[in-house]
Image: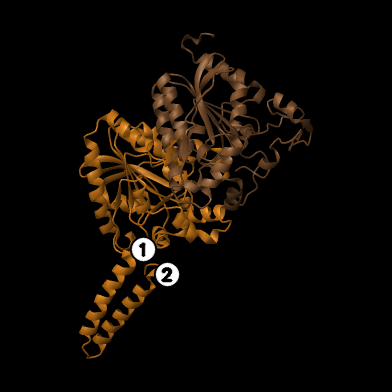
Amino acid sequence: MKKTLSFEEPIIKLREKIQELKEFTETNEVDLSDEIRNLNSRLENLENEIYGNMETWERVQVARHPERPTTYDYIGALFEDFIELHGDRVFGDDAAIVGGIGLFDGEPLTIIGHQRGKDTKENVKRTFGMPHPEGYRKALRLMKQAEKFGRPVVCFIDTKGAYPGRAAEERGQSEAIARNLVEMAGLTVPVISIVIGEGGSGGALALGVANRIYMLEHSTYSVISPEGAASILWKDAAYAKEAAVAMKITAPDLLKMGIIDDIIPEVLGGAHRDAKQQAESMRKTLKAGLDELKSLGRNALVQDRYDKFRKIGVFTEQ
Amino acid sequence: MPNAKSKSDVPEGIMTKCPECKHVIPTKELGKLLKVCPKCDFHFKMTAHERIDSLLDEGTFVSMDDHLATGNPLEFPAYTAKVKKDAETTGLNEAVLTGTGKIAGCEIAIAVMDSYFRMGSMGSVVGEKITRAVEKATELGVPMLIFSASGGARMQEGVLSLMQMAKTSVALNRHAEKGLLYVSVMTYPTTGGVSASFASVGDINLAEPKALIGFAGRRVIEQTVREKLPENFQTAEFLLDHGQLDAVVHRVDLQDMLSRILRLHTKGGAAL
């Protein structure tokens, strides 16, 4: 049974009612098929109405859904012969970032992504998908390895942010993120980043200096969490809902600002409702992106990334 | 994050009190001492112009991009007015002053952040000015110096301010690819998105004594880990101990240190 989000309740109630009627017709000899057909068409309308017009806060809830597909889910669905590679060769292996090599459409790729857990135990192991410096350094090691072998890199972004902790600071959280930004800028292979859940702050951007950036329809990408923004701007985290709107963090917002290149449509109601189907719709966008970048040479790829980020910003020359 | 101290250490009036040791000193005298407390070595915050005056060869600084004006992309109420007010008090168009000049005869491009302007936070104009200064350094084939003093990203510009971290990074990557020098000097405070981008990736990373430097805020960390943090947590000295800095340099020695670094990166190591 999937977790129900508050705005979905009318849909869930109607679904339950239809189920009840079905069971009733099976045990009693009455024909209610007209009523059921009627209710099913009402359900379809209701789903289109509610899921088709999600507000910002509803998208945030979907992006944070505990059953939302993670990096591992997309790796399993999209890449063959995947081998996971571990460790930063310096300090340790951060389970909040996973990576490795796999085949996409018969071509080897390097795949890297933030990894949340699906239950408390796994979340503790993976520090809720919030990486330490060694996670970013593992990611960079795998990117450099990809560059050596001419493999494109695909990054899945799914983090509330880099882990805020004493050990993380001691081992250079700032430097690890900063280094990734500068080094990703110079990679001579195609880089595609896809925001699949929450894209939180520098901890997300450290996997995001890409030639193409895509976002799943209900994912978010922001400089700070809605709660964090609310406590800074209005001194009260309870205004998170308002902050989420004000900060413009949804996929359509970022597309409008020219920061991302495309939105990957989600399964009606959110990716968690059908992870397989979701991966298939991602496959199309990923393939198109890789095909586009294939024609670019090493220098052109670096230039392409330069041009992409160089133009971001809103100001006037007076 | 800049703490409550930041308001009280603005040297106003004839006398200034050191927030650290409470020593009282004539403000004029403090200026001559590069705003370092003669009693306890506390480094007061400097404005961008004070920094330029204290380091560059006289009359060599030429500022760039003073004409760039901040927008209000997320339409935050009162944002434009706040920026305007800080522009009036600091005499800057944004939280960074950029340009070209010379230190001990060596040509450089330089960016100096000013924490009196919106806590030195980085929005589109700060990112653009720093990027243009780096591009200028690359074009001229000269070293780039960045003095950081920033609370991090500019909240009111949302994800656009986050992306300035990437924008400055692509420019620094190109500068590095040309084999050119970049020296980062971290001053009080260098935190958040500025710490996690250009400030941390100098060929040489320097910091002023006791400068606050870190990614996450102390309070956030304390809430997350519920452990007592050491007294010197996220200070320059703490970072030096943990291998994140090349040196902590007293402000009085900074000009000499920078000129030596610049000389050592001149082809053939030639003294100028």
Q: Chain A is drawn in which colour?
A: orange
Quadrant of the rendered image containing residue A311: top left
Q: Colour of chain B?
A: brown
Q: Mark 2: which amino acid?
A: Ser
- Which residue does the image show at 36% across and 31% down from the upper left? A186
Subunit of label 1 = A
Q: How crowded is mark 1: few (under 14 residues within 10 Å), some or many (20 or more)?
A: some
Subunit of label 2 = A
Most foreground residue, B123 or A260: B123
Taking the image as shown, residue B204 lies to the left or right of residue A106, namely right
Where residue A193 sits: x, y (%)? Answer: 34, 44
Q: In which quarter of the image is the N terminus of chain B?
A: top right
- Which residue does the image show at 65% across and 30% down from the upper left? B209
Taking the image as shown, residue A121 lies to the left or right of residue B227, namely left
Residue A163 visible in the shown view: no
In the rendered picture of this protein, how many numbered marks are placed on residues? 2
Where residue A131 sits: x, y (%)? Answer: 47, 45
Q: Which mark is residue A6?
A: 2
Taking the image as shown, residue A238 lies to the left or right of residue A6, namely right
Q: In which quarter of the image is the C terminus of chain B?
A: top right
- In the picture of the structure, the residue carrying the numbered disc 1 is A54
- Which residue does the image show at 70% across and 27% down from the upper left? B31
Q: Do the residues labelled 1 and 2 touch (CB within 8 Å)?
A: no
Where residue A305 sits: x, y (%)? Answer: 33, 35
Q: Mark 1: which amino acid?
A: Met
